[in-house]
C-alpha cells in the first residue's frame, strides 16, 4: 500500500481502517491531482482521482442547477466495488475505493471524530436501539464496548417505556453525573431507523451544555448521511429482548 505525507496520514487512516476499503485519497477538486494517498496495489490512483474530480464538478453543477443545496456525499456502486466521494469545505475531495459490501456508514465516521474533539468527550458509542455497535471512540477492550452497548440500549428501552406510560413522546436525552464524569444518552432518528449515542465526558474539561451543543451537529450529520428513501427496519420486541438478553448474559458470564 502506498503511503501518504504525515500531515494527511491521520485523515486517510480514518477511512482506510474500515473493513472493505481498498484505498483512499485526498484529491484537489479543481484539477484532480492526488495530494495524498493510501492505496492497495493495482489501483490506478491518478486516473481514479482525475475522473472522480471531473465527476464531482459535474454533479456539483447539476445539484446547484436543481437547487437541492450543497453536495455532501456521493456513492457510486458497481458489481465489483464502490467509489465514495466526500467534498470538503476547502475544495479537497476525500475519495475511497471499496468492496461492494463495504459499510458506507462506517466510512463516514468523520462527524463522530469531529464531535469527540469539539465536545471534549472521553468515550463515545454509536449503536442501534437493539444495542448493535456501529461506531465507537475511546474504548480499548471489546468487552467494554459490549457492556456499554447492552446497558445503554436497556436504559433507552426503559425510558421509552416510561414515556409511553406517561403518554408523552420519548425523552430527548438523559444525563447522569458523578464526581468526575458525566454520561449523556440520546437517540437520533435517521432514514435507517433510530440510532442511540452514549457519551462519557470529564466534568473538568467539558460540560453537559457543551456536549448537547455539539451533539445537535452530530445528529444533523448522521441524518444527512442516511439515505432519505430507505425504509427504516422495524426491530421486533422479541428480537430486541433476545439480543439484549444474549449480550447481558455474555457480559456477566451466564
Image (cartoon, rainbow, N blue to C red):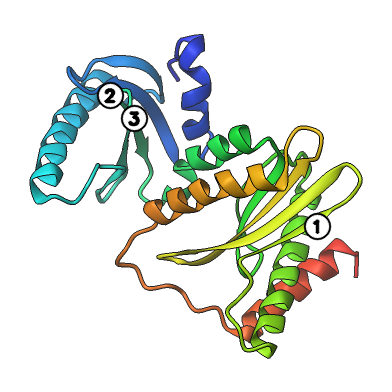
Q: Name the quadrant of the N terminus.
A: top left
Position in image of residue 253 (x %, y %):
91, 64
Q: Above or below — where is 230 with respect to 75? A: below
* Picture disc at residue 238: none
Q: Are marks 3 and 2 in contact (CB under 8 Å)?
A: yes
Which residue is drawn at the image coordinates 81% and 68% (left, top)?
A: 248
Which residue is drawn at the image coordinates 72% and 59% (left, top)?
A: 149
Q: Is residue 103 visible?
A: no
Q: Is residue 132 visible?
A: yes
Q: Above or below — where is 226 with respect to 78? A: below
Label 1, secondary structure: give it. Answer: strand
Decide if residue 169 is on the left or right side of residue 50. Answer: right
Q: Above or below — where is 60 with respect to 228? A: above
Q: Which residue is mark 2?
A: 91
Q: Are marks 1 and 2 in contact (CB under 8 Å)?
A: no
Q: Which residue is mark 3?
A: 88
Amino acid at each position: 500500500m502506498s503511503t501518504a505525507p504525515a500531515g494527511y496520514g491521520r485523515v486517510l487512516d480514518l477511512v482506510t481502517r474500515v473493513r472493505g476499503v481498498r484505498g483512499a485519497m485526498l484529491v484537489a477538486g479543481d484539477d484532480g491531482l492526488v495530494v495524498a494517498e493510501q492505496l492497495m496495489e493495482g489501483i490506478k490512483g491518478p486516473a481514479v482521482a482525475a475522473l472522480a474530480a471531473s465527476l464531482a464538478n459535474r454533479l456539483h453543477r447539476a445539484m446547484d442547477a436543481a437547487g437541492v443545496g450543497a453536495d455532501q456525499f456521493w456513492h457510486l456502486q458497481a458489481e465489483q466495488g464502490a467509489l465514495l466521494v466526500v467534498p470538503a469545505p476547502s475544495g479537497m475531495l476525500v475519495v475511497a475505493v471499496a468492496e461492494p459490501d463495504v459499510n458506507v456508514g462506517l466510512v463516514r465516521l468523520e462527524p463522530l471524530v469531529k464531535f469527540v474533539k469539539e465536545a471534549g468527550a472521553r468515550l463515545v458509542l454509536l449503536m442501534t436501539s437493539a444495542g448493535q455497535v456501529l461506531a465507537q471512540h475511546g474504548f480499548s477492550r471489546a468487552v467494554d464496548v459490549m457492556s456499554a452497548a447492552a446497558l445503554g440500549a436497556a436504559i433507552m428501552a426503559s425510558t421509552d417505556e416510561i414515556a409511553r406510560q406517561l403518554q408523552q413522546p420519548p425523552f430527548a436525552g438523559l444525563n447522569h453525573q458523578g464526581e468526575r464524569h458525566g454520561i449523556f444518552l440520546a437517540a437520533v432518528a435517521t432514514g435507517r431507523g433510530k440510532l442511540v449515542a452514549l457519551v462519557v465526558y470529564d466534568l473538568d474539561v467539558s460540560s453537559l451544555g457543551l456536549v448537547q451543543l455539539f451533539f445537535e451537529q452530530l445528529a444533523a450529520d448522521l441524518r444527512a448521511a442516511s439515505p432519505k428513501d430507505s425504509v427504516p427496519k422495524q426491530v421486533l420486541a422479541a428480537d430486541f429482548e433476545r439480543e439484549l438478553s444474549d449480550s447481558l448474559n455474555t457480559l456477566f458470564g451466564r
